[in-house]
Image: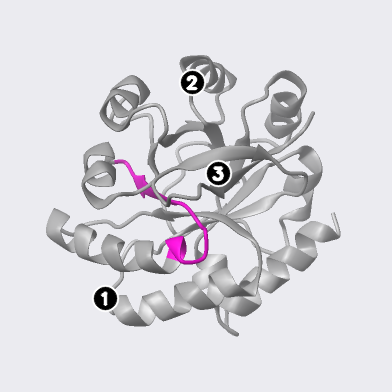
Amino acid sequence: MSRKGVSHNDTGSGATLDERAPTQLYLITPPRIDDVDGFADRLAEALDAGPVACLQIRLKDIDDDSVKRVTERLLEVSHARGVPVLMNDRPDLALATGCDGVHVGQDDTPYAEARRLLGGRAMIGVTCHASRHLAMEAAEAGADYVAFGAFFPTGTKEAKARAPLEILEWWQDIALVPCVAIGGITPENCRPLVEAGADFLAVVGAVWNHPQGPGAAVKAFEKAMAGA
């Protein structure tokens, strides 16, 4: 089947899904950003290094005003480069900050409520762990993508399930909705995920903690994905 990719629309107010062949990177912020301007520079380096489908803002243990302040700065960097931005968990904050959509987990705001708040043009993705049933439900409800994982051990977030490669193959066989692979993904281990059919690779530490910087990490992913 044709894979789908994310593209930002001309107005900067929303996102659309386009057919696009290669697997793409889906960046997620680290859970804590102390130096906002410094991180904005690192984000610009990552986005300038190679194709990135979108950025998810996933900040933990900070107040809403701080999330809004960080988001405002990162939106500037991302939208200037045509990269859409999704808020993690919080459709209300996505709406308040002008994000292009939201990513919701199984314990967060339900998909239907997120869609009601954000409207039909917003991009909404849903965590499905390793559940075929949850993925089917999300797709049938209208989710713009489903996320499977974790595929590898990760220190970013405690994984509730370990997803098998076969779930990506199955999804590509039966669904048109794009799928995101997440969990401990690095340039060294990503090729099986690409070969199995992941449309996006969601990455955190492998980019922001790369010893040569986030730009080098994006280039390494691009090379690894192209060789799959």
Q: CA distance from mark 2 to mark 3?
A: 23 Å
Assess whether residue 105 is covered by the magenta stretch.
no
Q: Which residue is mark 1?
A: 34
* Circle 3 residues within 10 Å: few <14, some 14–19, many ≥20: many
Q: Give the amino acid type for the residue marked by disc 2 in the picture.
A: Gly
Image point 42% across, 48% down: which residue? 158
Image point 27% across, 56% down: which residue? 60
* Circle 2 residues within 10 Å: few <14, some 14–19, many ≥20: some
How far from the left and from the top, in percent, is residue 5? 64, 43
Q: Which residue is mark 3?
A: 150
Per the rendering, the mark at residue 142 is 2
| Element type where label 1 sits in the image | loop
| Element type where label 3 sits in the image | loop
Dividing the image into 4 quarters, which one contains the C terminus? bottom right
How far from the left and from the top, in percent, is residue 75? 36, 61
How far from the left and from the top, in percent, is residue 224? 78, 63
> Do the residues under discs 3 and 1 have CB atoms within 8 angstroms?
no
Between marks 3 and 1 in the image, the one whose residue lies nearer the viewer: 1
Per the rendering, the mark at residue 54 is none
- The one nearer the camera, 88 or 204, is 88
Q: Which residues are magenta?
A: 78-89
Mark 2 or mark 3: name the one nearer the start of the chain.
2
Q: CA distance from mark 1 to mark 2?
A: 36 Å
> Do the residues under discs 1 and 2 have CB atoms within 8 angstroms?
no
Image quadrant where residue 189 sits: bottom right
Q: Give the amino acid type for the residue marked by disc 1 in the picture.
A: Asp
